[in-house]
Image: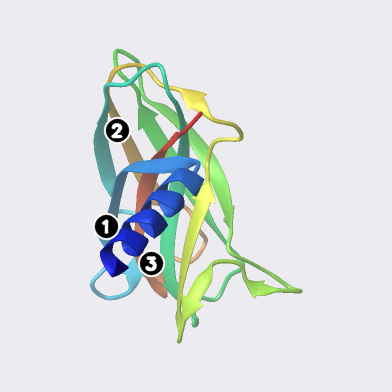
Amino acid sequence: MKKLGLCLLSVVFLVSCDTIGIFEKNSFFKEHSWSSTVKPSFTFAITDTSSLYQIYAIIRHEDSYRYNNCWLNITTVAPNDTAKSQQVNLLLADNKKGWLGTGMDDIFDHRIRLTRSPQKLKAGNYTFTLQQIMREDPLSGVLNVGIRIEKVLP
């Protein structure tokens, strides 16, 4: 009876989700410091072109991180396309709430959507390269950064 209840609970949980994570990868910084010369790169393949996708930046930092934000230069290479770069300001905290991500002890995780709305993606390999472009270099208090791709369910 317990197994049946656990299975039903799992099904309800899965049905209630409106996205499925299809790719997430992070790059870790040993010294908890991110130099602008270190440019983590993440490659993933899209095969389902009928679905919509959300793209997120992932950042994990210590409570000692000194800023409310993090400026990134994100370079994207789509299948059969040239590299496109954009500067993105990731908001990590505000003066009312403090850190906006989830935290445990002195570590905070942020999953920040890079796309305004779900996107159709072409079939093939995509590569995202992240570079921090803050005034402080190296940027201390950063544990890791990454990219997450989620398929939006109908």
Tell me where residue 28 appears, x and y as whole percent. Answer: 26, 64
* Amino acid marked by disc 3: Pro
x then y, percent, for residue 75: 39, 35
Q: Residue at x 23, y 72 (%)?
A: 30
**Does residue 49 lie above or below 65 as drawn?**
above
CA separation, marks 2 and 3?
24 Å
Q: Check the picture and name the quadrant holding the N terminus.
A: bottom left
Image mark count: 3
- Per the image, the residue denoted by label 1 is 27
Dot in front, 2 or 3: 2
Q: Amino acid at mark 2?
A: Thr
Query: What's the residue type where badge 1 is placed?
Result: Ser
Residue 88 visible in rendering: yes
First-in-chain label (2 vs 3): 2
Point 29% across, 55% down: residue: 26
Up the image or down, 76 lies above or below 48; here it is: below
Instruction: Tell me the SS state at disc 2.
Output: strand
Q: Which residue is denoted by mark 3 in the rendering?
A: 138
Looking at the rendered structure, the secondary structure element under dot 1 is strand
Identify the residue under disc 2. 127
* Disc number placed over residue 84 in the picture, else none: none
